[in-house]
Image (tube, coloured by chain):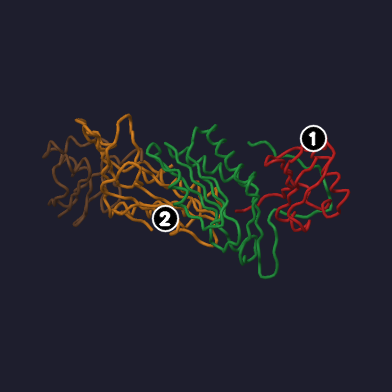
Chain colours: A red, B green, C orange, D brown
């Protein structure tokens, strides 16, 4: 299945790109995707530990199952003293 | 009215959007670019949003306010792009029959916005820049959903 | 900015008056003419002030806010004359470095205004009119100063 | 000594005038003035019991001493659900 990945703010700058598309095996979870990206890309492994993940615009936990066409975003901590 | 915009924000835009004859009070919040910030002189800020998700999260905040206070008149706008010191990055208005609830709900809205609406800012100083809230780290831990709301 | 005016009030007027680079938050309150009020359909309202005293009492409220929160950026305007349903009778803005204090001080300002600023309103309905807060009575008791602030 | 009296809102309408000037003996207090007005004018005696009095734009208690040129205002309860 194909999923779209999006990076924002510091994550976008660290990754050097705003988005990409990945082919993943059916049954891949958010946590498994994170594990794969960390293994493949040292830059991804250095993203902040308290980064959150959204799937189709909702925050999701690592056990969330991905599906064909999902949009997955990596969301560093949102801005502070506004 | 829930939006991410590149336009200048004003209090009137959001206040006018929520005003109604059965509401005796309108509370508006403007969050503005401060300088100095954490001891450094700010030249300007760059705001970036995940707009599709940010608008949905603003709508979620309005829904939470409806559940908690029965208030239906909420407007939230967030600006992105380059902002100068003193300009407003966020504008929120809440209208309610009684002012106590309008104050509470408006303050709730900005607190929630800062927790769940995906908008980031980069402070630019004379000698550098930094994404606020962003601290690149060597350590990687499991990534999950934010804590449930209070 | 502390004034009694016959002009239309907006949130921007007071918000712009208090905004400052070292203040990250501006909280604005608009009090608007409600209808129905206490079960009756309001045609319009007539506001009357004791203007020389009202302005002094607005300044006193700002001074109380300065003592209590260290906040110096407060604007209060009250409209007088005929107001239609939905129009704003009072506009208050408070700017502060941190939003918690701005919300608290703005809510304090409107609560104090309603206690000590000499402004009266007459509700006009299809079949009558009444000064709100006014109840003529046969009994006369000693007249004194209002209770000290909380 | 001469003092100026001002009436507002319901008090103005009940009294049929917005202001007047009175000659008072030196040493008159707010309370003594109230007593005199109540005795002289039934309309004044019927003003609300919780009316307040200001002297030169400050709320004052009945024992406050009046002085030449003072402006005394009778202030019915200010407006409620605004």
> Which image quarter is the C terminus of chain B in?
top right
**Chain under label 1?**
A
Image location (x, y in percent) of residue A29: 81, 37
Front one among C117 and B25: B25
The quarter of the displayed image where residue A66 is located: top right
Front one among C7 and A28: A28
**Chain under label 2?**
C
Front one among A41 and C78: A41
The outermost residue toward the left is: D40
Judged from the image, the secondary structure of the residue bearing numbered disc 1 is loop
Residue drawn at 29 percent across, 39 percent down: D77
Q: Are marks 2 and 1 in contact (CB under 8 Å)?
A: no
Image location (x, y in percent) of residue B62: 55, 39
Q: Are there few (<14), some (14-19), or many (20+) residues within 10 Å of tag 1?
A: few
The relative height of residue B36 versus residue D71 in the rendered view (above or below) is below
Q: Nearer the viewer, mark 2 or mark 1?
A: 1
Q: Which mark is residue A63?
A: 1
Q: Which mark is residue C4?
A: none
Q: Are there few (<14), some (14-19), or many (20+) residues within 10 Å of tag 2?
A: many
Image location (x, y in percent) of residue D70: 21, 54
The outermost residue toward the right is: A39
| Left-right relation of B141 to C24 | right
| Left-right relation of A40 to C4 | right
The relative height of residue B52 versus residue C136 in the rendered view (above or below) is below
Judged from the image, the secondary structure of the residue bearing numbered disc 2 is helix
Task: Identify the residue under disc 2.
Answer: C14
Image location (x, y in percent) of residue C36: 33, 33
| Left-right relation of B42 to C12 | right
Residue drawn at 48 percent across, 59 percent down: C19
Please state the total of marks drawn on the protein image. Answer: 2
């Amino acid at each position: 299945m194909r999923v779209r990945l999006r990076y924002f703010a510091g994550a976008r700058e660290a990754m050097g790109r705003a988005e990409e598309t990945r082919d993943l095996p059916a049954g891949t979870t958010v946590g498994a995707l994170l594990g794969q990206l960390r293994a493949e890309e040292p830059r991804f492994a250095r993203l902040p530990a308290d980064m959150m993940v959204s799937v189709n615009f909702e925050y999701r936990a690592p056990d969330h199952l991905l599906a064909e066409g999902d949009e997955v975003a990596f969301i560093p901590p949102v801005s502070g003293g506004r | 009215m829930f939006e991410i915009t590149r336009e200048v924000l004003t209090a009137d835009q959001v206040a006018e959007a929520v005003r109604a004859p059965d509401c005796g009070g309108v509370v508006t919040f403007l969050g503005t670019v401060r300088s100095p910030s954490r001891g450094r002189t700010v030249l300007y800020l760059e705001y970036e949003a995940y707009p599709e998700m940010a608008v949905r999260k603003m709508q979620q905040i309005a829904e939470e306010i409806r559940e908690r206070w029965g208030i239906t008149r909420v407007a939230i706008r967030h600006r992105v792009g380059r902002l100068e010191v003193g300009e407003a990055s966020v504008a929120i208005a809440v209208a309610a029959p009684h002012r106590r609830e309008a104050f509470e709900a408006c303050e709730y809205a900005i607190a929630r916005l800062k927790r769940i609406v995906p908008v980031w800012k980069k402070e630019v100083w004379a000698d550098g820049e930094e994404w606020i809230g962003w601290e690149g780290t060597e350590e990687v831990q499991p990534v999950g959903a934010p804590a449930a709301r209070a």
